Amino acid sequence: MATSTTLAELESLVGKDLGASSWIDITQDRVNTFADATEDHQWIHVDPERAKDGPFGAAIAHGFLTLSLTIPLWTELLDVTDATTKVNYGLNKVRFLSPVKVGSRIRLQATIAAVDEVKGGLQITVDMTVEIEGADKPSAAAQAIHRFYA
C-alpha cells in the first residue's frame, strides 16, 4: 500500500522506510520483449536451453530490465497527491548485485534519503533495493532521483 502524502509533507518522510511493493514475475516473455526493445539478445537472457549450461544455470533478466521495473514498483510505494507532474530525474548510483533468474519474482524496497527544493517543485532522493523472492542477496541497489511539481 502506497504512502500517501503532499508536497508540503514530503520532508517529514526523510529516513522513512516506505516498505515493499508487490512481487512481479520475471518471465521469459518479459525478458524477450525487453531484448527486442533494446536489441540486446545475448544468449544468457534469450536462450534458456543454452543458459542452463551458462554461468548462472538459467536464463537471467537484463540488469537494465530489473532497473526499469523499479518504476512501476515505485509507484506502489509513494503517492504525492498534489503533484501534477512527476519526473524520473536520474540515478546517483546503481549496482547489480545478483542475477535475476527467469521464473523468479522481484519486489522493490525503498527509503526516502533526502528532499530538496528545485525550481517549481521538490526533488527526492530514494535508496532502493530490488529483492529476489527467497534469495539471501538482493538483485540491485540504486539511488534514484525523482522530481515532483505542483
Image (tube, grey):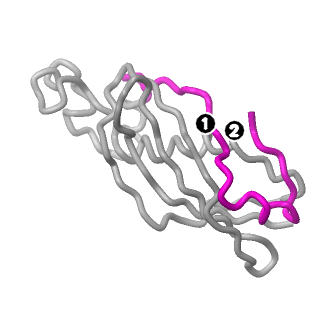
Location of mark 1 (residue) = 20
The residue that appears at 45% across and 36% down in the rendered structure is 131
Going by the numbered disc 2, the residue's amino acid type is: Glu
Q: Where's the N terminus, which quadrant?
A: top right
Callout 1: 10 Å neighbours few (<14), some, many (20+)?
Answer: many
Residue farthest to the left, as pictured: 53
Q: Do the residues under discs 2 and 1 have CB atoms within 8 angstroms?
A: no
Q: Nearer the viewer, residue 56 or 50?
A: 56
Q: Is residue 70 above or below residue 57?
A: below
Point out residue 92 in the picture as x, y percentages from the top left corner: 47, 67
In percent of width and height, residue 119 lies at 77, 81
Q: Quadrant of residue 48?
A: top left
Residue 59, image quadrant: top left
In this rendering, which labeled residue sits more in front, label 2 or label 1? 1
Residue 8 among those drawn in magenta: yes
Above or below: residue 30 compared with residue 112? above
Give the structural element (helix, strand or loop) at label 2. loop
Q: Residues within 10 Å of mark 2 (few under 14, many from 20)?
A: some
* 122 up-or-down from 35: above or below: below
Magenta stretch, residue numbers: 1-30
Q: Residue 38: within the magenta?
A: no
Q: Secondary structure at mark 1?
A: strand
Task: Please identify the residue farthest to the bottom as the structure is shown.
Answer: 119
Hey, what amino acid is under mark 1? Ala
- Residue projecting furthest to the front: 15
* Front residue (pair 93, 60): 93
- Is 12 placed above or below 18 here? below
Q: Is residue 40 left or right of residue 87?
A: left
Label 2, on which residue? 76
Q: Residue at x 76, y 64 (%)?
A: 148
Q: Is residue 77 found left or right of 40 in the rendered image?
A: right
